C-alpha cells in the first residue's frame, strides 16, 4: 500500500518536472509563433497592411475584424529603426513585439487627438550612443529601447465605420518604416 | 509511475495553457483573460501561452482581450442557440465583440453582414445600456447573424482601458451571456 503511494508520489514529482520543462521550452519549440506568421504575410521592412479578418479565411493572428493593422519588421543590427507618419484622427495604437511575441513596448494616441506617429527603436548599444549625443535624432522622437535585435512593430488603427476601411488601410500603408542614419 | 508522470506533466501543462485560471489568467463570470500578456517580461506561463497561441497580443497600454467559451451558466457556447449579452462593460475608449470559431479564430458571422459589434455603433436604451443578441435566427435589438454548426467563442476586446491596472481594478463589470432558446 505504502509502496504504491510512494510510486504515485514519485510519478507526481516527475510529472511536475515534465510540466516545468514543457512550460519553459514551449516558447522555443512553438511552430506557430506570431513572428513566423508575420514573416509569411510580407517580406521586406514594410509597412505591410495585414489582410482583414473575414469569415472566409482562418485568422491565426486573431485579428479584430474591426481594426486595420500594419506591420514593420525591424533588424536593429542595421541601425536604430524608426516608424513614423501621419494617421487619421481615430483610435490608433502601436506595439513593439519581440521575436517570441511578447510586447516590448506599447502606447496609444490618448483620446484620439494625436495624429503624428514618430517612434525610434534602439538596442542598448545604440541607446548609449544616443545618451552620449553621438546619434542625431529629430526632436520629439518617442524613444524605445529593446534588448533584442529582431523585432516587429504593429500599428493598429480603428476606422469609425467599415466603409472607411480602404482609406484607413491606405493611411497605414503610407507609414514609413526605416533606419535612422548613424 | 511513468504513466502518472506523463499524465500529470502534460495534462497540467495543457490545462495551464488552455484554461489557465490557476496560472495567471483572470476570470470574470464566463470571461477570461491573461493579465500579463501585454507586459514586457511576462511570467513563464504567460510566455508559454503567447508562444502556443501565436496571436498578436494587445500591449498592456493598448487594451485587454477577454474570451468566453461558455455562457454564464457554464455551458459551452453553441451555434444552435440564441444568446443575449447583457450588462455593462468597464470604461474603455471602445470595445468590440466578435463571435469566432474556436480552432482558427475566423469570425463566424455571415460574410456579407456585420462581422462584429462595435460599442459606438449600437442601439442603446435611454439609460445607455445595450442588449446584444448572437444567433442564427432573427433577433431584436442589436443582432449578429452567425453561421455554421458546433461550438464557438466570444471575444471581447476593450481598447484603451485602464480597468485592470491600478489597485482598485473595476473588474466586476463584464456583461453576462444568457442562453435563451436552442434550435
Image (tube, rainbow, N blue to C red):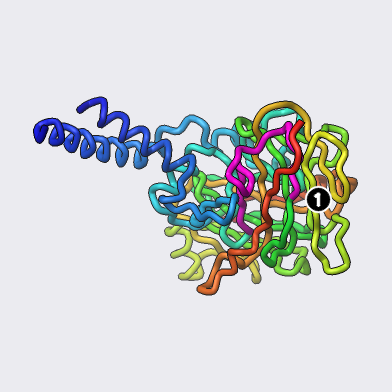
Left or right of B47? Residue A178 is right
Tell me, yes or no, whether the highlighted magenta stretch contains residue B69.
Answer: yes
Q: Position of residue B22 (x, y in %)?
A: 41, 51
**Is A80 situated above or below A73?**
below
Left or right of A10? Residue B83 is right
**Is A165 situated above or below A111?**
above
Left or right of B117? Residue B167 is left
**Is A165 situated above or below B64?**
above
Extreme residue toward the bottom, this view: B168
Left or right of B82? Residue A148 is left
Q: Which residue is mark 1?
A: A171
SS class, disc 1:
helix
Q: Position of residue A128 (x, y in %)?
A: 44, 65
Q: Position of residue B46 (x, y in %)?
A: 45, 49
- Tell me which residue sits at (63%, 58%) in the image: B63
Q: Which of these two is toward me, B24 or A105?
A: B24
Quarter of the picture holding the N terminus of chain B: top left
Q: Which of these two is toward me, A161 or A80?
A: A161
Tell me, yes or no, whether the highlighted magenta stretch contains residue B114.
Answer: no
Quarter of the picture holding the C terminus of chain B: top right
Q: Which residues are magenta?
A: B63-84
Q: Residues within 10 Å of mark 1 (few under 14, many from 20)?
A: some
Q: Which of these two is toward me, B37 or B170?
A: B170
Please indicate, yes or no, whether residue A99 appears anywhere in the rendered image: no
Q: Within the image, what quadrant is residue B128 found in?
A: bottom right
**Label 1 chain ID:** A
Amino acid at each position: 500500500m505504502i509502496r504504491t503511494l510512494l510510486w504515485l508520489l514519485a510519478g507526481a514529482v516527475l510529472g511536475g518536472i515534465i510540466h516545468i520543462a514543457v512550460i519553459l521550452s514551449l516558447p522555443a519549440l512553438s511552430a506557430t509563433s506570431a513572428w513566423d506568421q508575420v514573416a509569411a504575410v510580407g517580406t521586406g521592412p514594410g509597412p505591410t497592411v495585414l489582410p482583414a479578418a473575414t469569415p472566409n479565411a482562418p485568422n491565426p493572428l486573431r485579428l479584430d475584424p474591426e481594426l486595420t493593422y500594419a506591420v514593420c519588421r525591424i533588424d536593429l543590427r542595421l541601425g536604430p529603426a524608426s516608424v513614423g507618419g501621419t494617421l487619421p484622427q481615430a483610435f490608433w495604437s502601436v506595439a513593439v513585439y519581440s521575436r517570441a511575441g511578447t510586447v516590448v513596448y506599447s502606447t496609444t494616441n490618448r483620446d484620439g487627438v494625436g495624429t503624428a506617429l514618430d517612434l525610434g527603436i534602439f538596442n542598448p548599444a545604440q541607446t548609449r550612443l544616443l545618451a552620449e549625443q553621438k546619434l542625431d535624432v529629430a526632436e520629439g522622437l518617442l524613444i524605445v529601447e529593446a534588448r533584442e535585435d529582431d523585432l516587429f512593430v504593429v500599428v493598429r488603427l480603428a476606422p469609425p465605420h467599415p466603409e472607411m476601411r480602404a482609406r484607413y488601410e491606405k493611411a497605414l500603408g503610407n507609414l514609413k518604416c526605416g533606419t535612422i542614419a548613424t | 509511475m511513468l504513466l502518472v508522470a506523463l499524465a500529470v506533466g502534460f495534462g497540467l501543462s495543457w490545462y495551464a495553457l488552455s484554461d489557465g485560471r490557476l496560472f495567471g489568467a483572470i476570470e470574470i463570470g464566463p470571461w477570461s483573460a491573461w493579465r500579463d500578456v501585454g507586459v514586457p517580461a511576462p511570467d513563464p506561463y504567460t510566455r508559454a501561452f503567447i508562444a502556443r497561441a501565436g496571436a498578436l497580443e494587445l500591449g498592456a497600454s493598448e487594451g485587454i482581450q477577454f474570451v468566453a467559451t461558455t455562457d454564464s451558466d457554464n455551458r459551452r457556447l453553441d451555434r444552435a442557440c440564441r444568446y443575449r449579452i447583457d450588462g455593462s462593460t468597464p470604461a474603455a475608449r471602445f470595445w468590440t465583440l466578435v463571435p469566432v470559431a474556436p480552432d482558427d479564430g475566423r469570425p463566424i458571422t455571415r460574410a456579407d453582414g456585420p462581422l462584429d459589434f462595435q460599442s459606438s455603433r449600437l442601439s442603446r436604451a435611454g439609460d445607455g445600456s445595450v442588449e446584444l443578441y448572437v444567433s442564427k435566427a432573427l433577433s431584436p435589438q442589436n443582432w449578429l447573424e452567425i453561421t455554421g454548426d458546433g461550438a464557438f467563442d466570444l471575444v471581447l476586446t476593450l481598447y484603451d482601458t485602464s480597468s485592470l491596472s491600478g489597485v482598485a481594478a473595476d473588474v466586476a463589470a463584464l456583461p453576462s451571456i444568457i442562453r435563451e432558446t436552442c434550435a
